[in-house]
Amino acid sequence: MIVENDGIADTLELRRGSTLARGEVMGEICHHLSPFQVGEKPIAGDTVIAKDLTIDSLAIMDMVMELEDRFDVSIPMNVVAEIHTVDQLADTILKLHARR
Amino acid sequence: MGLFDRHAGLLEAYRDVRTTGYDPFQIRMERVLSPTEAIINGRKTLLVGTNNYFGLTFDSSCMEAAIEAIRAEGTGTTGSRIANGSYNEHVALEQEIAEFYGKKHCMVFTTGYQANLGIISTLAGEGDQLLIDADSHASIYDACKMTQAEVVRFKHNDPSSLEARLRRLGDRPGNRVVVLEGIYSMLGDTAPLREFVDVCKKYNAYVLIDEAHSLGALGETGRGLCESTGVIDDCHFIVGTFSKTLGAIGGYCVSDDPDFDILRVTVRSYMFTASLPPSIVASVRQALKVVKARPELRKQLWDNVATLYDGLAAQGFKLGPEHGPVVGVHLPDRMVAIGFWRAMLDAGIYVNVAVPPATPNGVSLLRCSVCAVHTPEQLQHMVEVMTGIGRQLGVIDDRTRRVVGGAR
Ligand SMILES: Cc1ncc(COP(=O)(O)O)c(C=O)c1O
C-alpha cells in the first residue's frame, strides 16, 4: 500500500508501521537496474551495483531519487556512498522506511 | 591496482573523443583578438563558448583600471585575506557588491568555485541538512563531499521534489540549507525560484542561490534571477563569480545575516589561499560600474540570444527549454557531439562540447554562450554553418524546415 503522491502519503501511510515487504523493494530496485544488466547474469541481492552492471555513478544517484519518492524515504548521499550491493540498498530503504 | 587503473573507463571515453583529431579539452587559443574572436589552429575563429556575456574582457575602462592598479600596487598580494592580502580595494569591492544587492555583508573569494566550496560546506555543519538540485555545478557537489551535514538531492528544478524531502525531515533537529542556481550552466534553464522560495519558507529552510550565469543577464539592474523573480530578500545567501559577465576571475557571497563575518575565520577556501591581485580587483570594480551604467548591454545580450536560439530552433535543432545566455544544443550521442564540434571548429566557430559524465541525464550537448557584443551577422552565420553541418550529420531534417511557433 505505497502511495506515490506525497501529499496523500502523509495521511495514508506515515501513520506508524505499515510494514513494507522486502520483495517489493527488491522488485523495484531490479526494475530500475534491468537496463544496465550485463549479458544473461540475473540481478540478485549480491550484485555489486557499480561493478557488475553498466550503470554510472550519476545514474545510480538518479535511481536513488526515484526509489526515495517511491518509498517515501530520503537516503543521504553519504549513505548512498556506502551502499555497494542490491541487498544493502534494499536493507537501507527498509530500515529508513521502518524508522519514519 | 595501479594508481590510474580506476580511471580506465574515463580514459576510454577520452580516447573516443580524441579520435576526431582535435582534443576539445586541450584547445589552445593561440591569440585572443577580442571577446568574440581568437586564432585557433592558425585560423581566425568566432568564439561562442566563453561565458563572456557582456564582452567586458576587452572593455577599455576595465583594462585601464587593471593596468593602473598594477602600477600602483604590484602584480599580486602574495597572501591570504586573513594575513597580508586584504587591501583597501578588496574591502571597497566587498562594500560595492553588498550595496549592489542591498545586503549588509559580502565576502570576496579568489574564485567562484572556492566561494561555493567554502561557503556551502561551512554553512551546513554536523547535524544540519543540505538539499541540492540534482543538476548542481561541480563546485556545489564538491562542497557536499566536504561538509559534515547530511546531503540529499532533489529533482532538477522541481519544487515538489524539494518539498517531499523537506517534509520527510519532519521535526528532526538541524538547519536546512537549500542550494539553487539562477541559470543552469549546461542547458541554460532558470530555476522556478519563487516556487522554491515558497517551499523553503514553509519549512523554514535557508536559501542559497548561485547566480554565476545570471549576474548581469537577469533582473532589471542585472542582479540575477533573485531580482527578476522579486525574491532578493528571501535569498539568505547569494553567491556569484567575476569570471563570466564581469570578465575577470573571483567569487563572492552576500548576506544579511548579522553573524556572516564569522565565516571569514571559518571558511578554509577563504583563509588558506592568496587573495585576488590588485589588477583583478580593480577591473572587477570597474566592470560592476559598467554593468550598472550600461543596461543596454543586457538588451543586446538578449537580442543576440533570440537571434541564435530562434535561428537554430527554426532549423529544427533540439535546444534547452528557454531563451538564455547559455544555449544548449542537444545531439544524439557523444560521438555525434564531438564530430559536430570538430566540424564547427574547422568552419571557424568555437563552442563548448559537453558529454557524459559532465552532463545531466547523460545528454550530449554543444554548449553555446552568447555575448552582448556578438554582431547579428556573426550569429546568423553561425546558424547557417550549424544548419549545414546538422544536415550533413543527419541531426536535422534535410528538406522540410520545421517552423517553430512564433519564431522570427
Ligand atoms: C554554476 C557555477 N557556479 C560556480 C562556477 C565557478 O566559477 P569560477 O569560474 O569563478 O570558479 C561556475 C563556473 O564554472 C558555474 O558554472
Image: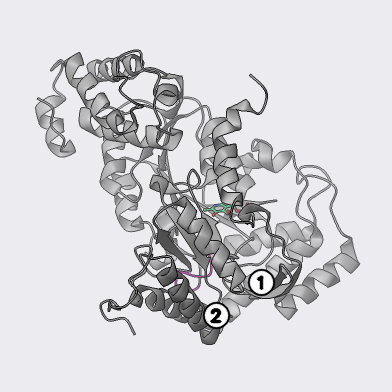
Mark 1 and mark 2 lie on one chain; the one further toward the N terminus is: 1
Q: Is residue A41 left or right of residue B67?
A: left
Q: Quadrant of residue B228?
A: bottom left
**Amino acid bearing label 2:** Leu
Q: Callout 1: 10 Å neighbours few (<14), some, many (20+)? A: many
Which element carries disc 1, helix, strand or loop?
helix
**Residue B101: x, y in percent?**
53, 63
Task: Confirm whether circles 1 and 2 share one chain.
Answer: yes
Q: Is residue B244 magenta?
A: no
- The residue at label 2 has a CB less than 8 Å from ligand 1: no
CA gap, disc 1 to disc 2? 12 Å
Tell me if residue B128 comes above or below residue B221 in the rendering: above
Residue visible at 52% across and 60% down in the picture: B339
- Specify the segment rendered in magenta: B214-221
Q: What is the chain identity of the residue bearing mark 2?
A: B
Q: Which residue is mark 2?
A: B297
Residue A3 shows in the view: yes
- Of the pair B30 and B140, the residue shown nearer to us: B30
Tell me if residue B16 comes above or below residue B188 in the rendering: above
Which element carries disc 2, helix, strand or loop?
helix
Residue B212 shows in the view: no
Of the residues tagged 1 and 2, which is closer to the observer? 2
Badge number at residue B287: 1
Q: Quadrant of residue B342?
A: bottom right
Total marks shown come to 2
Q: Callout 2: 10 Å neighbours few (<14), some, many (20+)? A: many
Tell me if residue B47 comes above or below residue A82 in the rendering: below
- Of the pair B271 and B66, the residue shown nearer to us: B66
Magenta: main secondary structure: loop
**Residue A99: x, y in percent?**
26, 16
Quarter of the figure that contains the C terminus of chain A: top left
- Of the pair B71 and B386, the residue shown nearer to us: B386
